[in-house]
Image (cartoon, grey):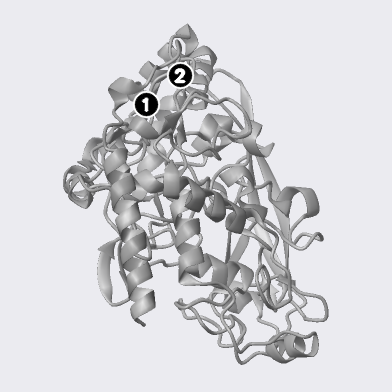
Amino acid sequence: MNCILKYSFSLLSILACSACDNDGIDILDIEIPDGYALSAGTATNFLNSSLAYDTPADWVSGVYENRFNQGDRLYDDVRTSGNGHGGGLGPVYAGYSCGSCHRNAGRTKPTLWSEGGSGSYGFSSMLVYISRKNGAFFQDYGRVLHDQAIYGVKPEGKLSVEYTYESFSFPDGEKYELCKPTYTISEWYAEEIKPEDLFCTVRIPLRHVGMGQMMALDPTEIEALAAKSNYPEYGISGRCNYITERGVRSLGLSGNKAQHADLTVELGFSSDMGVTNSRYPEEICEGQIQVNQGSMMGLSYDQLDITTEEMEDVDLYMQCLSVPARRNVNDPQVVKGEQNFYQAKCHLCHTTTLHTKPRGTVLLNNTQLPWLGRQTIHPYSDFLLHDMGSEIMGVGLNDNYVSGLARGNEWRTTPLWGIGLQEKVNGHTYFLHDGRARNLTEAIMWHGGEGEASKNLFKKMSKEDRDALIAFINSL
């Protein structure tokens, strides 16, 4: 025990000294190339490549660089069904690594469009949330339907999707099309759940851009935004989501509905990959037949699959990633598009500028990242919940799934930084929570509820002005 304490103290001392060595980094030290603008202070990068989401901030060095690289490996390494280091996958799962769903720290192309649902290559790059019509979970399944399983084990079910298409026109005559997904589940491992008893919502991965800055946000600033986020002339009134985790009530920031107070590293290993850990020591299919099937395939359940220290390295990796700079800021079309962004009142929810706390962030095993503190950032989000409507094509964006205080029609404002590089990083332009929007125009035209006024202002613009606004969003 004394040896462990001595080691912990030594490591903390090294980290503290490393922090002192890097305290001098300032935005004044950054040479900003022509045509670019800072997005995340000292954690901004100027890349236009597929690595734009997956590059460390300049202040990552020394011990932190070693831990960043270790976290990167743990994030990307393919897990296997065996026990021991790198094992622990399953018995059921959604992805075989963090990187299988978040390729290059982005949004891996989901199999919804390419294969019509659950993928055939061991992952789908999506999560399938299910609940009863009254919001309760099904005893034999839990909150997530795991549609993948190791060899010899039966998945909990398989998802299929069909799209209904409807054509619309802008006032100037240009046509656009929206696609409404309808999900069905088959091959239930246990008793089949009837569609009339089921709510099903699908989530494709979020970009892991600006995760450290999000965790370092000053909660009082977000709460102040909620207090003043009342624009009755535009039907906008954002509110905070509050989450109780580990017995502590906190402001929710992470996730599609701001339903988490942290980056859910431990939950991701457990629920998404079936990797047991100190926070979630039981298999996600505990009590189901898959546990016995896993035993028959050689799995042992008498040890945890990943350590807390390893998970903190993943947490560190995600929070130390740099954020792509704004690009093409001098392009006349982008300049015009930014003006149109404000004219359409998009900024009332997609808040352009926020600030981080003085002391930065604290990781899940108490390591501090002070460099994330005292930064001016431009995420283009207020991180608040907004009613996004239930009318478009009969459903709108209402998925009937409650998360904390968030109702089915409420969603956290999506941060827009880095969005214009998604196609380069991940090879697709699917947007919104379930990828139903195939481009940014469709994503805007799905806005209802509190986004209705901005959508209509965009809709009434000339094609030239609409294209300019899209060019501006692509510059973020």
Which residue in the structure is indicated by mark 2? 461
Residue 333: in sight, yes or no? Answer: yes
Residue 427 placed where, x, y %? 69, 36
* Residue 344 badge: 1
Instruction: Give the residue at the far top of this rendering.
Output: 332
State the image quarter where residue 457 is shown: top left
Residue 393 higher or lower than 312, as above or below: above
Which residue is found at the position 56% from the left and 40% from the top?
54
What crowding class fits label 2: few (fewer than 14 Cα within 10 Å), some (14-19), or many (20 or more)? Answer: some
Which residue is found at the position 67% from the left and 76% from the top?
84
Question: Who is closer to the viewer here, 223 or 201?
Answer: 223
Is 104 placed left or right of 262 in the picture? right
The kind of residue on which mark 1 rests is: Ala
Which residue is found at the position 27% from the left and 56% from the top?
240
Query: Which badge, 2 or 1, is on the more N-terminal residue?
Result: 1
Question: Who is closer to the viewer here, 133 or 89?
Answer: 89
